[in-house]
Amino acid sequence: MTQSHRLNNIGLINRNKKISFKFNGKKLFGFEGDTLASALLANNVHLVGRSFKYHRPRGLFGAGIDEPNAKLQVVINGQSEPNINATEIELVEGISATSQNCWPSVEFDIGAINNFLKSFFPAGFYYKTFMWPKSFWYRVYEPFIRKAAGLGVGSTEKDKERYEHKYEYCDLLVTGSGPSGLASAYAAAKSGAKVILAEDKPRFGGSLLTDDVNIDNLSGKQWADKIISELKEMPNVTLKNRSQVFGYYDHNMLVMFERTGDHLEKKSKYHPRQRLWYIRSKEVILSTGSIERPIVFGNNDTPGIFLASAAKEYMKVYGVVVGKKPLIFTNNDSAYETAIEFKKNGIDPIILDTREEQDTDLINDAKNQGIKIKFSHAVAVANGYKKVKSAKIGKLNSNKTGFENIETVECDCICVSGFWTPTVHLTSQSGNKLKFNKDIDAFVPDKSKQKEITIGAANGSFTLKETIEKSFESGANVAKKLTEKEVNIQVPSVTEKKQKTHDKFWCSPLPKNENPKRFVDFQNDVSVSDIELALREGYRSIEHVKRYTTLGMATDQGRTSNLNGLQLVSNIENKIVPEVGHTTFRPPFTPVTIGTIVGREVGHHYMPTRKSPMHEWHIKNNAVFVDAGAWKRPRYYKQGNENLLEASKREAKNVRENVGICDVTTLGKIDIKGPDSAEFLNRVYTNAWMKLPVGKARYGLMLREDGMVMDDGTTTRISENHYHMTTTTAQAANVLSHLEYYLQIVWPELNVNVVSTTEQWAGAAIAGPKSRELLKKLFPDLDVSNEGLPFMGYVESSLFGVPAKIFRISFSGELAYEINVESDYGLSTWEKLMELGKELRVQPYGTEALSTLRIEMGHVAGPELDGRTIPSDVSLDGMVSKKKDFIGKRSLVKEAFIKNDRQKIVGLVPTDRKSSIPEGSHIVSDKNAKLPNPKLGHVSSSCWSVENNNPFSLAIMKDGKNMIGKKFFAVSPVHKKTIEVEVISSHYVDSKGERVRS
Amino acid sequence: MLHIKCPYCGIRSQKEFAYGGDATVKRPKLNSEVSDKEWDDFVYMRKSPRGKHTELWHHISGCRQWFKAQRDTTTHEIFETAKINEEIK
């Protein structure tokens, strides 16, 4: 197939490089520099998709981010991606695109039946139809709607591409490289300010590439090239094309995505596909330009209907004509340039101008070139199904509410212009309110909330001379604030054609006896009649009309439809547009891939990984890891075909019978120093700390001010004014912040310093009846007897030359020690423990065995200290001092906390002594009771007791202290289990605590 | 994302900070008689003002100092930050 609609000597494409691509399975050709859209049009392909609701044939309409229809499923580099705008993707060899929302094909789509049933699909159809019966929702309605709706298909495969994030700081960010962006960036850059200029298209220049203007005797394109080449030479300027600023956040933080890969035929392995920029800019100039809006008329969604500016861009940038028999339908002067461009390329257009006969430079140009112009005329209805074939046009009556006559003219495209809408999305996102400018019938920025200004067409300035002059001034002024340098720049002379005001005409009346659909929002299939219906049904707020009809809610955010929708509502309501108001613009301005937002934080980079110094040893010894916050902890060490339960039983049993070692590096460690440390601990913990001797450890319990247990751990007095605190792995960071809060804010008079030393020390717990023997082997010169190193004792010694801290503390309930060495010695110490413990049958144990050991001992941990328990709930009231004050003490006397039937920790065993009780089960007295079955408590921790060889659980139960000996049911609907249980003491093993002191 | 001036380190991104709530709340003195209402007000009751709010921030991924900031809760504008022992005007 030849490129039938390609022109020979116009455009910025490279005709020497032919590129092949596929569309709906058909092989086509384009040129380097094309977009997918321009290449399709060069091949006279207009029909690209089906509309969302009615499955009407849809064609290309715009040439950039204004495109509402051409959302394609595109395969690039072997990866399929949905909803890609054909107008924004550059043509590269091998690209393959298919139409969406159609079956079996875009040419013949079964769903188009909806178009004939359109009277059954009014606004709010889904709300009205799928409401009842309620039970139909999940089984019938939702699957049906999901199947019928939606555009492309998301890939289920892993994204192989690389995405990156970048942080940047600058003095000035300029968004958009049209005349105002270039002029302001240039002026600011000249004063030395650090400037970033962002342009979403591959080519810089914006409207300068297509408008017929003269700046310093250069064409717009030539002048833009000159400015860009100068900016490129400046070290203080960053020029970014293919880069869309899509979000404006607090404190001048803007977010931009840069398309770095898709336009390249080949890229290296580590070359990112897209890059997300976080830009913190001292000042921002928004030069986002404007978007042409269409005029609404009958069947205005037929393929072959374009924005006039898009038709011009296809000619001037891509050398493509969108049709050979064009109708130009306008209410202003700008579309005349499109007509003249057609004429220049040998094509005769007809112009329909809704205004009465006008006399301006552009109109006279058109007349002089022999272009046929019909004033006071409008298109009423487009004819044709998959492509425009002709149009019913007519002379408007004097108040433009009807036609005086109707005639049919043949055409193969209609180029529409309903004047220009400033692109105020980013301005609005910055917090700026908008105001209505009656002269241009559109919203423009009001007062700036942040350090930004909006200039040029985005601010409603549609004359180039004014835009260029003001933009140079703005750029220089902003830069002066930042660099305090004055620059003198010769503002270029601009010649442009004077234009007359536009006609406030935005929707054609219907011809008599005809009722074609007139679309306001193409992407969401919202027509004039839908909006009328919404208003008849009583919707008034524009936000409600928007949600009911879905006007402007598609991915194009109503770029070409919002204002026409507002005009319609205000006409019907007899209000002026500013009274109707406008909907809110939110980021992202254009769709952004999830990959870009996520960046490199995928897979194991999703969050940082913390590893103990012994990590490599654990891997070598078949550890199965579990995540504990960011830490990786061995859950168990697998031997042969063991499963989790078998391995943890073996490991726990070995601790009870011989000796085990556990990596406890992850425990939080906080160094506390200063003369008031004891006093501080005394306030932080519930128990007494003033009399703890040097060389002794003590178990401590800390509360929040609301009386709930925050954390527990041991703290050891290393020397007179030096303490070593340990926290649970999970609460380490919170406890440090908590301590800092009280020291810095509440009690600044205390002379105490705290610092985290978690990562400075590697820790190993040595637990079991043979742990003393192992310790003796490690420290042959140390007195490790019960008298020499008693329970809760602390000594420092040398472990084969390595300074070590030895604590006699126990979590397992066995005779146990913890050894801390500097992290770098962690691995060698661990290996030494294994080597010397061999004949004592030492085995490493993981967190699962660790839990088993503490659960059957009745020691509480995270599942019991869940932020909802006070000390007495977990039977730690003995830890609460009655004599002194401490954080949270005042809360403990609150009525609910001293109630007689207050919840309490208990032990549970299944009556069959076999069934494991799932954690999280609820305890009920009647397993067959009607729902909601009153909950008496919940199972917090479960294990297989190795001491008693049956399941055992801890539970927090209402009035738990009086429940011992009673039977209940533990129910877990999640696990579909109901187990009869007997309540026993939470101390299932060694309830007198003799072992730890042995 | 906010840009916050730590009184010790200078302007940094919000990512480095943790929010700490109303800075005007005063903890009752240790060992003092406190009524239920006073205590509940201290533990639970917070105002949610529209406009200026003096609050605590913690430079948690920086110098780890707590400090005060006066922020507009509607616009997020930060008028002033100060060390804990300094007054906010």
Image (cartoon, coloured by chain):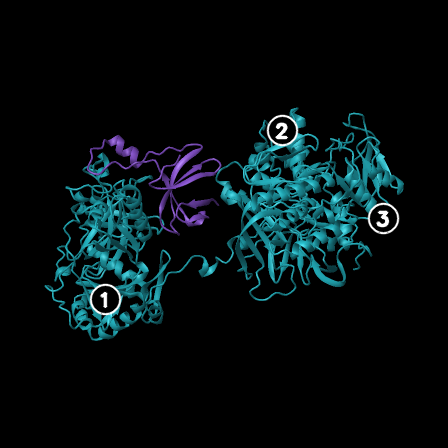
Label annotation for residue A578? 2
Residue type, numbered disc 3: Lys
Q: Residue at x 21, y 69 (%)?
A: A798
In the picture of the structure, the residue carrying the numbered disc 3 is A344
Discs 3 and 2 lie in a common subunit: yes
Total tally of numbered discs in the picture: 3
Front-most of residues A273 and A535: A273
Residue for point 11% across, 64% down: A786
Q: Colour of chain B?
A: purple
Hue used for the chain lettered A: cyan
Q: Which residue is mark 1?
A: A804
Q: Is residue A634 above or below residue A102?
A: below
Q: Position of residue A448 (x, y in %)?
A: 57, 36
Q: Is residue A117 visible?
A: no
- Are there few (<14), some (14-19), or many (20+) residues within 10 Å of tag 1? many
Q: Residue at x 14, y 55 (%)?
A: A693
On whether disc 1 and disc 2 are found on a single subunit, the reply is yes
Lateral position of residue A481 relative to residue A229, left or right: left
Task: From the viewer's side, name the closer residue of A951 and A60.
Answer: A60
What secondary structure is marked by label 1? strand
Q: In this rendering, is residue A616 above or below A890?
A: below
